[in-house]
Amino acid sequence: MSHPAELIGSNVKLNDSPDSPSFATRGLLLFVCNKEICNPSITYYGFYLQNYLFCVENAQPFTPRYKRGGVGEGKGLFGLSGKLTIQPEYQRNYIYADGKKDVAVIESILKGYPLGLIYFNKVNENKLEVLDGQQRITSFGRFVTNKFAIKDESGMQQYFGSLAPELQEMILATKLLIYECEGTEPEIKQWFRTINISGVALTNQELLNAVYSGPFVTLGKEEFSNSLNANIQKWGAYISGSANRQDFLERALEWVSKGKIDDYMSRHRFDTNIKELKNYFNSVIDWVSAVFVDVESEMRGLEWGRLYEQYHHHPYNPQKVSEEVKTLYGDPYIKNRKGVFEYILGGSTDTKLLDVRVFDEATKKAIYTKQKSDAELNGISNCPLCALGHEANKIKIWSLTDMDADHVAAWSKGGATDSKNCQMLCRTHNRAKGNR
């Protein structure tokens, strides 16, 4: 196995690289100021984890700068005097801050485990981007600035500042292998997709952000992917997922594009405002919160964009809607509370949305047996509605498999789902009766 230093300065054509033959990588060793092997023809980077990045050739320390969100989210994090962008537009937000993945990064360092390759994209002579590895790099920075702790051998929480000096030095002296990639924008983004097929999988929206990176995505992420946005908690009542994983941005785009997110992002990629996106999103949220004044947990994750398009022109009385929601929530026969809201919006007619509890098999068999016995005694059909007719089925005895249980008094009109309100009808009459 080659020593990492042997890879320095080597230009490698990737056999499985994107289509263009010009796409290549140059191996770089990331280390702490090891000037002994410096070569004037190669750019070396020494990464001091204690909040500094060093350019070895110039031996100049640079403090990372943060635009928004701070190190906790990895937003706007730069190094090498602004030359290195640690979170480019196409990168997802920092997602390792869960007390598991971030801790695992530091524990791997302390155990001497390899952390895998890190890739830089060479934009031009004066600009580099972290193509892959920003989660690990940001975890390093957060730990050495005491943003989270790890557990020692005794199970005690230890921040970087409380570690033994030799452990601090081990972390600060960590060596990583870096590949610098050059290519066109489509090539770089295709490579970004390729190297992200392992680890924590990218969401579909994170991939789309990479493909259509530009001012529109940047503004969209500032609005919908910023966990410091005061509206996140309100939006979270209606949208599933997290801002960091781009779920809120994805819903906003899905709603305004009527499900054609890819096409919408392509057309608006270089827009310098997101007014249409914000206005439509806020219209949906404001409409939902106005119609349903009581926020229920089952509202989270519903297809509010579709429901808005279908029903926002209909007039609703919020007080009556609230009373109906409470009534339906108190009904023991309703199995699907998530369907309550569309049921009400649609005029309270489509009971399939509620998955109303049906009669059990024992009840159906008992009612069938009684109806069959009474029908045979009276010489009529065991389907009460057939018995009232004049056709041949007036005296037909149906088998149990040819009949369905039916509410005598419809459930929607207060009828209970018990044996006293159950009758067996032939399937034709049961379908014809519907909700009457």
Image (cartoon, grey):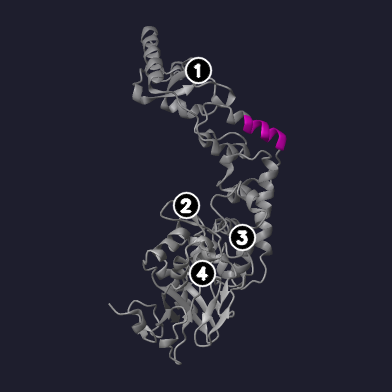
Tell me where residue 197 appears, x and y as whole percent.
39, 65
The residue stretch that appears in magenta: 318-326
Question: Does label 1 or label 3 sit earlier along the sequence?
Answer: 3
- Amino acid, disc 1: Asn
Q: Looking at the figure, which quarter contains the C terminus?
A: top right
Tell me where residue 250 appears, x and y as whole percent.
55, 58
Question: Does label 2 or label 1 sit earlier along the sequence?
Answer: 2
Relative to 206, say whether 18 is above or below.
Answer: below
Q: Nearer the viewer, mark 1 or mark 3?
A: 3
Name the residue that disc number 1 marks.
421
Count of numbered circles in the view: 4
Question: Does label 2 or label 3 sit earlier along the sequence?
Answer: 2
Tell me where residue 31 appears, x and y as whole percent.
44, 78
Task: Please say whether residue 324 is one of the residues in the magenta stretch.
Answer: yes
Task: Please say whether residue 309 is one of the residues in the magenta stretch.
Answer: no
Q: Main secondary structure of the magenta part?
A: helix
Name the residue that disc number 3 marks.
226
Q: Residues within 10 Å of mark 3 (few under 14, many from 20)?
A: many
Q: Measure how far apart labels 4 and 1 are at the Cα level.
A: 59 Å
| Tag 3 secondary structure | loop
| Tag 4 secondary structure | helix
Q: Measure how far apart labels 2 and 1 are at the Cα level.
A: 64 Å
Name the residue that disc number 4 marks.
210
